[in-house]
Amino acid sequence: MKKRKITIAILLTSIALLGVIVTQSIWVTKSVKLRSDLLDQNLAVGLKRVVNQIMLLQSNLHNHQYDISEEEESVSEHKYFIQHLDPAIIDSMIQNEFRNSFADQKIYYAIFEIETNEFVICNCTGLDEEILNSPHKAPISCVFQEDQFMLSVLFPRQQQFIIHELQINIISSVIFTLIIIFGFWYIITILFQQKKLSEMKHDFVNNMTHELKTPIATISVASEMLMNPTIIEQPEKITQYAGIIHEENIRLRDQVDNVLTVARLERSDFKLKLDNINAHDIIRNVVRKFEINIANRGGMIQTRLNAANMIIYADNNHFANVIQNLIDNAIKYSPEKLEITVSTHSSNDGLTIYVEDKGIGIEQHNLEKIFLQFHRVSTGDIHDVKGFGIGLYYVKRIVGAHGGTIQVKSAPGKGSSFLVFMPFKKIDELKK
């Protein structure tokens, strides 16, 4: 997929995701507001009903024991009635009215005189200011009476109560939104990984084609020379060209074997052939194969095999390939000053092998990538360093299969040092 298409897809998906988040936020906000308005409405209606019950109670107890004018008598009776109300009756009215709407929630209330703010009946000790400023109030008076007393209710946990009622919807909304965000992030991550893998495989195919064409071309030229009739008269040339064909054939075989080995690593039936082996003997044999090539380049390779215990439980061939790949990697990335040192050290737990060079080194941001399949640290052109980008991947997989670890220390211009730890204890064969 082209970079532009990926960018457009990410942009559109991001906009859609943002739209979903905004929509969910608006929906939750409106739900809370709607529930709050409904609650306020229920409180207002409930207050009216309680006031009606109080006035009905006053009507039933009505008497004319005061010798005053009709209007004054009405006011005096009302005031007397309110001031002598039984708090238990008011409490019962309040609780019965709001029990269904506010189950298990405490409702604070008060009846106070409007002019003086003096409480007549209340259960709101310590909440005087809150109850006086509550938006939920209703005057206690008849149609023709002056408003003298006010009934006020307070529900201090109203917001928490609303959120508690809507918590299932809110939590589910948040969870689904987070799932969408995680899914989007995961898809984008996989998309970039696939894109990166595709690029690496493309480079791998290009590198493999280049690496295989070189020995094939050399074999082709040498074969054509051997087919020349005049070559029979030059035995030394026959030997020379036959040697070239033989060397290039080995090189071609090794390249194919590397690819096939990595392919086998990916299969579930891959197993190690474990045995007690002498690590020093194997290291010496591998180093010996590189000595002539390194000497021809004016370089040197030396060994410092100082481990007291060099016997490890490992696969002979794969361990040799690990050492070979590490030395080969050191050669590739030491274009000028080719100095390689292979040393060993043993502890109670296992054997540590050090492969150090004084090559170009590795940038810090590349250190974690060098063990990835098909990854190569390039120094410019795609073919400036030979290889398929599978050597260090193979090394890490094999070392890990033995229960060991591999580390790398490097700095640009100062070379690299690979530390391979192989445990002494026996381990199970590789299982995937």
Image (spheres, grey):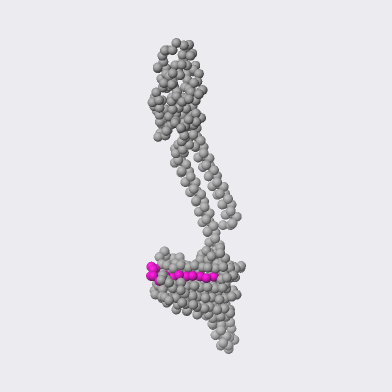
Residue sitting at x 46%, y 38%: 160
Residue sitting at x 56%, y 68%: 411
Residue 168 at x, y percent in the picture:
44, 41
Magenta stretch containing residue 420, yes or no? yes
Identify which residue, 325 or 339, lies in the foreground: 339
Range drawn in magenta: 416-429
* Residue farthest along the bottom direction in this orientation: 233
Residue 358 lies, with reference to residue 18, above or below; the image says below
Residue sitting at x 48%, y 23%: 113
> Which quadrant, please, contains the N terminus?
bottom right
Residue 18 lies, with reference to residue 342, above or below; the image says above
* Residue farthest along the right direction in this orientation: 380
Q: Is residue 337 visible?
A: yes
Please indicate whether residue 381 sits to the left or right of residue 161 in the image: right
Q: Quadrant of residue 230?
A: bottom right
Residue 68 at x, y percent in the picture:
46, 11
Query: How many numbered dots are placed on residues in this image?
Result: 0
Residue 14 lies, with reference to residue 121, above or below; the image says below
Identify which residue, 102 or 285, lies in the foreground: 102
Identify which residue, 280 or 346, lies in the foreground: 346
Please indicate whether residue 44 sits to the left or right of residue 231 in the image: left
Residue sitting at x 39%, y 23%: 86
Magenta stretch containing residue 361, yes or no? no
Residue 120 at x, y percent in the picture:
45, 24
> Which quadrant, please, contains the C terminus?
bottom left
